[in-house]
Amino acid sequence: MLEIRGLRATAGSKEILRGIDLKVEAGEVHAIMGPNGSGKSTLAHVLSGRESYQVTGGEVTYQGQDLLAMSPEIRAREGIFLAFQYPVEIPGVSTTYFLKAALNAVRKHRGLDELDAMEFLALVKDKLKLVEMDQALINRPLNEGFSGGEKKRNEILQMAVLDPILALLDETDSGLDIDALRIVAGGVNALRGKDRAMIVITHYQRLLDYIVPDFVHVLYDGRIVKSGTKELALELESKGYDWIKSEAATVH
Amino acid sequence: MSLTESTGRFIAAFNEQRSARKDGAPWLGELHQAGMASFTKLGFPSTKNEDWKYTDVEPAVSLPFGPVNGKPKSFPMGEILSIGFAEEDGPRLVFQNGIFAPELSSTRGLPGGVRLASLAEQSREADGLVATQLGRYADLKGNAFVALNTAFIGDGAVVVIPPGCRLTQPIYLVYGSGAMERPLVSHPRTLILMGADSEAKIVESYAGANGGKYFCNAVTELIAAGDSITHYYRLQNEGEAAFHMGTLAAHLERGSHLTAHAVTLSGALVRNNVHISLAGEGAECVLNGLYLGEGKQHIDNFTEIEHAKPRATSLELYKGILDGASRGVFNGRIVVHKDAQKSDARQTNRNLLLSADAVVNTKPQLEIYADDVKCSHGSTIGQLDPGALFYLRSRGLGPDEARSLLSFAFANEIVGRIQIDSLRRRLDDYLVAKFRRI
């Protein structure tokens, strides 16, 4: 489904991704771990098409297409979803209003009929249960005054409604207490399926107790320096990142 | 034409109409004279006047105006009601080019004691209520447009909410203007008296047909007695070529609350003066402003809040979206008097520029003479947030759609605060349609 080869990207003059290789198949959940500043979030944003990063090398194939040639909205309509680490607050527009507009843009692209207000509401009501969210919350201005947990639940709600093919979860566990983490992870797990792939970016192993990955990769200094199964995450948890750093230093 | 010549023309018009005013009540004649005396002294302000620094009134006042407060001429008033976002039914007073139109108005369903009537009619009432209250708080001596309005007071609206009355239905005052053969000037005057412990929602709407030039110079006085609650909405959707000068002078007594919206959607040259006097202890006002400029529109919001007594609160948020080569001006003056301890004043002005040629001048002015107060102010001028744009695009919205949604959101923060559901929905629809075009 997704193949990244030698991906390099800069933010301004600073090179952050320095040759990423990664292959993700449908139905798989990949975790990407790594110390702060290793390039995890950058990778997620580059895959979503954020223009503040410049891709300087490599290629990304998504469902047989050149992903890097697509604008952010085309990527979204083609099924890529990024759950933000810091969801944006937009006073003046409710989640409902915004999400209906987004869903209809996606549906139009996929050749489906646009949903009217009633149909949309029926769909959302169903998805709200997944993340144990109250309907009143989505009639409030988007993320404005939401707690950390509410914002993350709102991200997963959007994911459930937009029904992506490839979901990128950027530090979805950050700022969550254990109850919120359980709810958010529960929502994510409910969305796992044989046609959907997920890339879960996290600093801590904790999230992976709830969302159990098929593969774990360690990103350090802009490269994937180690890949393995979920046991690798546990090893990182007990040993920290330092041994990865020294291993990486001897390799390069 | 110079400002002095324009001033002279209005003085001459006043003198010509002397005979027409002879039949009016003597007190009104005196008020006219006082207005004209002050106007003669002040003249139209030039941009050398600090309060008018960014707004050149010359194009508005130099028009070759027809008869002042000209006779109404038929134009599609059904349209005016919709342009003015007014209710099809419910209590309302409608004015055509400044003259009361009883056939389009209704006072049905109002509880006893509520007075909703034309000013021309009320000024002849024997109880003298209007005679004693009109002109008390609008700044005749300092503002030439208030003086001019006062000199030419003809018609307008009187709203009296008796003590203890909690009115649930909103009252609409619709001032419709339409072009005549010659440019027309009108001076609508509104007087709102809120009794002690009363509550009301009042919408004052200025609406005009596109096409001709006209000049609407409106003044509203609002006197809020103790513990009253007023939701006041001033909507301005004049014709594109129109000139609009509007003044709200509000006097708030002990423990009263005023929420005053000022929504400016159209007009070529617009100035909104707002003067709020927090004249009683614990009075509070919330000012919500929205102005949308495009083309060559010029929109100036000049707000002054006076904290005269202790423990009063003012919360002000004005937001502007400027597109094309339009210009927005915001001046927010807050004066905290010596005795007004424990005052709480917060002021914010936020501007969104959608084009490289749009301009905003924003100026907070805080004058604080008390020592135990909380005062804050802030202003921002910016473009749409790239982070928010990316967020929306990452959900599938195209760049134009994302920009349109963010602009709508920016404006809707103000519209969302409107407490009349039907009015809020109508403005919401208006904004959605407007920003879809951007």
Image: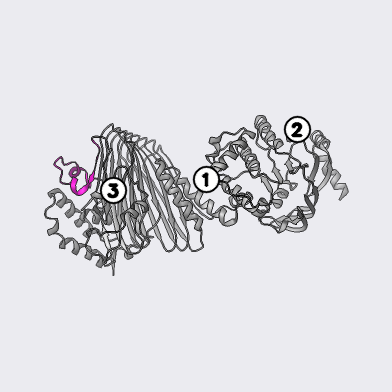
Residue B14 lies within the magenta run: no
Residue B217 found in image quarter: bottom left
Q: Name the residue under label 1.
A: A93
Residue B254 lies, in percent from the top left, at: 31, 34
Asked if residue A43 lies left or right of residue B92, the reply is right
Q: Mark 3 points at which residue?
A: B220
**Marked residue chain, label 1:** A
Residue B144 lies, in percent from the top left, at: 27, 57
Q: Which of marks 1 and 2 is nearer the N terminus?
A: 1
SS category of the residue bearing label 3 = strand
**Marked residue chain, label 3:** B
Q: Same subunit under labels 1 and 2?
A: yes
The furthest residue to the top? A179
SS category of the residue bearing label 2 = helix
Q: Name the residue under label 2.
A: A209
Residue B118 lies within the magenta run: yes
Asked if residue B368 lies left or right of residue B38, the reply is right
Q: Closer to the camera: disc 1 or disc 3?
A: 1
**Marked residue chain, label 2:** A
Asked if residue B75 lies left or right of residue A80, the reply is left
Label 2 Cα neighbours within 10 Å, binned few <14 / some 14-19 / many ≥20: few
Stretch in magenta: B113-136
Q: How far apart are marks 1 and 3 (CA)?
A: 32 Å
Residue A18 lies, in percent from the top left, at: 78, 53
